[in-house]
Image (tube, rainbow, N blue to C red):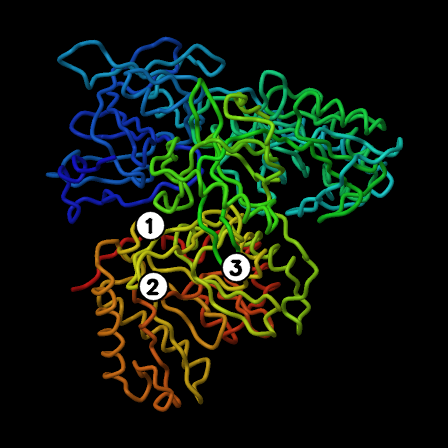
Amino acid sequence: MSLRDYASKRRFHETPEPAGGEEPKPAHRPIFVVQLHHASSRHYDFRLEMDGVLKSWAVPKGPSLRKGEKRLAVEVEDHPLDYAGFEGDIPKGNYGAGHVDIFDHGHWACDGDPLTSLAAGKIDFTLTGEKLRGGWKLVRTAMRAKQRQWLLIKRDDAETADLEADDLVAAATKPPRKKKPAKATYRVTEARWKKTAEAFDGATAGMPVGLKPQLATLRSAPPSGEQWLHEIKWDGYRLMVDLVDGSASLRSRGGLDWNKTFPEVAAAVESLAVRNASLDGELVVLDGNSRSDFSELQRVIDGSSKASLRYLVFDLPSLAGVDLRAAPLDRRKQLLKDLLASHEGLLAFSDHIEGHGSEFFAETGRQGIEGVVSKRSDSKYRAGRSADWIKVKHEQADDFVVVGFTAPKGARTGFGSLLLAARESGALRYVGRVGTGFDDKLLNTLHQRLRKLECKQGSVALPEHVPFSARSVHWVTPRVMVEVAFRGWAKEGLLRQASFKRLREDKSLKDMGAPETAEKSMQISHPDRRVFAACDYTKGDVADYYRKVAKWMMPELSDRPLSLMRCPEGSQKPCFFQKHHADSFGPNVHPVSLKQKSGTESYLYVDSIDGVLGLVQMNTIELHPWGAKVDKPESPDRLVFDLDPGPGVTWKQVIAAARDVRDKLKLADLQSFVRLSGGKGLHVVVPIARGPSWDEVHAFCEAFAQTMAHQAPETYVATMSKAVRKRRIFIDWLRNARGATSVASWSLRARAGAPVAVPLRWEDLGRIAKPDAFDLAGASQRASRLRVDPWKGFAELRQSLPR
């Protein structure tokens, strides 16, 4: 991707347009935006996210919602992702001078690689916006002299309308949709549902919001008896929905806000003939045989598939202001089935059978379904894991050939993992690796066997982003066959959760055919193990806490090298820091090779809450990120000043010092943010644009701290020496060196009372009574109440470092 043309046409010291630099978010649905541009020639700018930029077209007459209507679209320079939020005036004399409004925005998708379609000159796609929805085409004209001219065409579908973009601007409205019932009708319908629900045994008044999901316990076989209901175990994403006064709130199992990611699901729920309800179900994509396809769901999310989402709902904890959690499951499900009976399309009822669990499980195996969830028909809805819900999975296994191995780490001997391949169309294709399921004897004997097969050239090509260094691979001649159990396929065509079963001495490479196409959420072992003895918080509580704050924590934590505080025996016993990657952290914790004085070393980072949970599984409490990201580790993007009070310094003095640092930074045109460190002091954090080196950042921070100490020597010191810190505050600037870290916002601290490093608004600081004001429970409650990030604008702020 290149923004050279974009930057060359603009003088960013004069125009409010963004200079670019926003990183594309991993595993997100690509966005589109249409902006109405009142330039010298009024037109609409039509932009689609591709390859980390906004591919852009100028559409003079704007999109038409009439089927088959063609609109000229002139391809222009790529724009940065943050341009999608731009509105305002481009000053006279600048390129594109005039006023810009956002006309519409949302998500878009096509089948396959959009860049391939772009190069071919025809993009067939769908839009999910407020005004523009349904199928569209962009077709490049055949005129050789005008290769940058395209036609934007609305496809014939249910979203066509006799409207132009200008009609929607003039009317300041959205295109006509299927009308919702009037409020009076809602009141009648709601009253009817409420009366039905109130008649259930266990029903009480109230609308539970933000419920934690009920979880199933893994078993090897389904339970028997007519008191059990058996459902298909769908392979998708768990989705909880609160419908409150007609407005739907979507959240993942871990508590992430999914409204912006899946707006069509929210709209479907809001179209129900009730205004208040709680729904629990699975978000999936179904194949032609009505089986859930997790890989296709991933492709829908990354925008490379136009497949339809389905929200399969299997429980109804509340309806019409009636709390049904204590009502029997079979009654809740019947009411849910009635509620969804008239709804077509995205929402569907997840049905079940009564009794016959073994037969049902066997049939799901024959049909290639992941497994079964069995539930007591009279059970209540309880958050967390219980024996009322039982899950049973079919194991999927296949044979693969070993094409290489990695070196062992830590105390392990033999090898770290085996690199596997499958035969497709006569050639071998890399399908992933397996590192679990071996005993010590097999590790050594198989290693000796593979060493004899080592060769210089690999027999397969590795994907671009493998979580290990290609140079560390020991390639082998593909002769050894192994059987591996796994949990399906990821969207890249790689094995999920692979585990070694056995060597296939009875098979050779010529016997191997193509692999058969067949629990994403991280499981925490020993969840009842006490981690904070004085306050009884457990390992399970730590995991639940990080799930709950993930929405606020992950943007700052993701894609940065990390140092960890691990406490295998709890915070009250000796803990240790770790910064290097280990396979024991699991597949969601990734290695990154970084150059050090001693050579290249494998550090670690995460890009999802499952990665954090993988660290918690290995007894991690504290998370300390670098001030740079893994894609550009030599380009810091934030400064941290840790205000560490010495003996005799009051909390009010620490607050005053933080405000003083803020004010001094303002003099250097730097906006800053504040957080409780979870210890005795405060952190003042400054986001900057990537560009300065670590040496430049380090030098600036040292000079800043030394200047403050020089100007107020009775208040501040800028050296670590404890001998001079009595009644003074140490402005710790040393955290701004390459490899240095500071604790992440929302991270727990491995200290008595389970304190948390909580980010604050500056205006809230004066209301905080003590430095460790929030423990695990308090921070969890604060996170659940937040509607706006206290560091709003932090990620978008790219300030220049003074020279």
Residue at the (44%, 75%) spot, across then down: 681
Q: CA distance from mark 3 to mark 2?
A: 26 Å
Q: Are marks 2 and 1 in contact (CB under 8 Å)?
A: no
- Note whether residue 571 is visible: yes
Q: Residues within 10 Å of mark 1 (few under 14, many from 20)?
A: some
* Tag 3 secondary structure: loop
Structural distance between the alpha carbons of marks 2 and 1 = 24 Å
Question: What crowding class fits label 2: few (fewer than 14 Cα within 10 Å), some (14-19), or many (20 or more)?
Answer: some
Which label is found at residue 635? Answer: none
Instruction: Point out which mark residue 411 bears.
Output: 3
Disc 1 residue type (three-letter): Glu
Residue at image mark 1: 796
For the residue marked with disc 3, what is the amino acid?
Ala
Tell me if label 3 and label 2 are in contact, CB under 8 Å: no
Q: Circle 2 sits on which residue?
A: 739
Residue 436 lies left or right of residue 106; in this view the side is right
